Amino acid sequence: MEYIFSLEFIYLIASMTYILGLKMLGKPESARKGNLIAAAGMSIAILGTIFLYQGEVPTFIYVLIGTAILIGTIIGWMIAKKVAMTKMPELVSLFNGMGGASAALIGLIEFEHYTGKTLSIATIVAGIIIGSISFSGSMIAWAKLNGTLKKPLRLPKYNLLNNLVIISLIIFAAFIAWSGSDSQLLLYVLFFVALAYGILFVLPIGGADMPVVISLLNSFTGLAAALGGFLYGNMVMLTGGILVGSAGTILTFAMCDAMNRSLVNVIFGSFGSSDEQMGDMDSQTITGSIKKTTVSDVAILMNYSQRIIIVPGYGLAVAQAQHAIHELEQLLASKDIEVKYAIHPVAGRMPGHMNVLLAETNVDYDKLVEMEDVNPEFKNTDVVFVVGANDVVNPAAHTNPSSPIFGMPILEVENAKNIIINKRSMNPGYAGIENELFYNQKTSMLFGDAKSVIQSLISELKGM
Amino acid sequence: MTELIEFISNNIQMIYIVILMIFVGVEVIGHVPAVLHTPLMSGANAIHGVVIIGAILVLLGVNPENYLGQALGFVAVLLGTLNVVGGFVVTDRMLEMFKKKK
């Protein structure tokens, strides 16, 4: 009795650390501590589960658990320490998939112990379905983000097909639960069909929408963990799982909001990847000419400016130019020029991703200005330097109702006195939309790889 | 139907927790600046690694003769650990950078 009480108590503490930790993660000053608190709560919950377990357990089972935890810790630790910060999103996806797989495996093993108990079986099969979808979906998202899978793959009538698969999956799961069947074969069929559905679900979605998908799958895994908690009456799994499930859902909607898309549009829609859209884009191709500029012209322009705003995009991260841009910013600041970064909520591959990337190079936190705060400042700005960003500065979001990004909040760089855009080429951005900003009178295009362009800018400026 | 009602009354405490936790989750995320969305997602990702507790319970309770169960349970604990350790470490790495401001 005493033991049970103390384990329950540990779970209570752990649940509290999750809530507290997540809350503290929401503020820059306390975020790191919040993460550590949640990690500490997780550790005591795991240790408590192992050492306060009641019942006869053969020693080799403990060895098995210990080995699994040891291997997992070493591998997890190494991957997490070694990965480059630009690779963050796919890593989160990878770890998310691991959790989903774990939840699905639990269901596979526990199935036989609950034969005949309809609602427990229903919980188990739901856990298997959600966990498997989360696993295979996360793996596809991971492959898409690291470039293994480049093009969205679309089977004919994929929406209809996917809906048929998920509906039959649910009917099949309901049949297993309510028929009282104890067939392992049926269970494994369910498992593999769910895995296949996860693949079918994510494959047609374009790379630009992967953060939303990962966030959604993140909350799926939370739900799968919570179902496990329901099955065992285990409070810490229940609270942790539901907390992540609900927080993840809100985060998913926040991301969709920032991109002005609905979740339905992300899942069933096409833009973000499609080429069909390009057809009717042609009819409204923007006419006008673009103006090219050179590094030395830009250097002179910057040298005689008072206020400069840098708009970093994912292109900056791809070119690994975050250190170079920080050097440029410091150099300009040493010439008494006011420099800020304008951060669009969806710059990078995840909301906040750009902040993480720039923080990596020790950019001052106060220099990163969010969209709402920076937009009124553009009209007093001499030079806006757009590096590897495109859709987040596209005025079509304001002016062209037929544009797929119409309504998305953007950085209003067109109000600045001079606009310098660094891009590798004239290729349209992730959304595949033409950008009339490039044809603006005030815009000069500075073509080239972000890193080398910024580095030559730095050496030009140093000579002035 | 009676089964469902029975289920609800047997698990009423857990149902309360589910409902309240949904609101806590919404509330906790509600007012977070976009800057912290990535670390937050990563942190939440680590927390759902709590599924490892279930995996450990499976292994602790598995029949010593059930080799398939042991193998799957072993994999489940391993994957769960990856989720937990990798998730927390990578979140910490992200947040470490935020601290370096002057």
Image (tube, coloured by chain):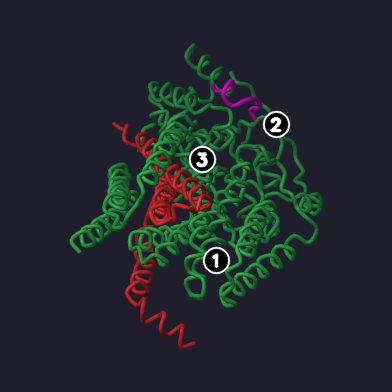
The label number, if any, that marks residue A253 in the structure image: none
Relative placement, left or right, of B17 versus A119 is left
Answer yes or no: are tags 3 and 1 on the same subunit: yes
Q: Nearer the viewer, residue A16 or A292?
A: A16
Residue that numbered label 2 is attached to: A425
| Amino acid under disc 1 | Val
Q: Secondary structure at mark 2?
A: loop
Q: CA distance from mark 3 to mark 1?
A: 27 Å
Q: Which sits earlier in the primary sequence, circle 3 or circle 2?
A: 3
| Amino acid under disc 3 | Leu
Q: Mark yes or no: residue A363 visible.
A: yes
Q: Label 2 crowding class (10 Å Cα cut-off): few <14, some 14-19, many 20+?
A: few
Colour displayed for chain B in the image of the structure: red
**Which stretch is magenta?**
A445-454
Q: Position of residue B16 (x, y in %)?
A: 34, 74
- Residue drawn at (64%, 70%), measured in percent from left and top? A172
Relative placement, left or right, of A58 versus A182 is left
Residue at the farthest left position: A2
Q: Which sits earlier in the primary sequence, circle 2 or circle 1?
A: 1
Q: Position of residue B56 (x, y in %)?
A: 39, 51
Q: Which chain is green?
A: A
| Amino acid under disc 2 | Ser
Q: Quadrant of residue A317?
A: top right
Chain of the residue that carries numbered disc 1 in the rendered image: A
Chain of the residue that carries numbered disc 2 in the rendered image: A
Q: Nearer the viewer, residue A4 or A253?
A: A4
Q: Nearer the viewer, residue A160 or A447?
A: A160
Residue that numbered label 1 is attached to: A125
Q: Label 3 crowding class (10 Å Cα cut-off): few <14, some 14-19, many 20+?
A: many
Relative placement, left or right, of A8 versus A354 is left
Magenta span contains residue A47: no
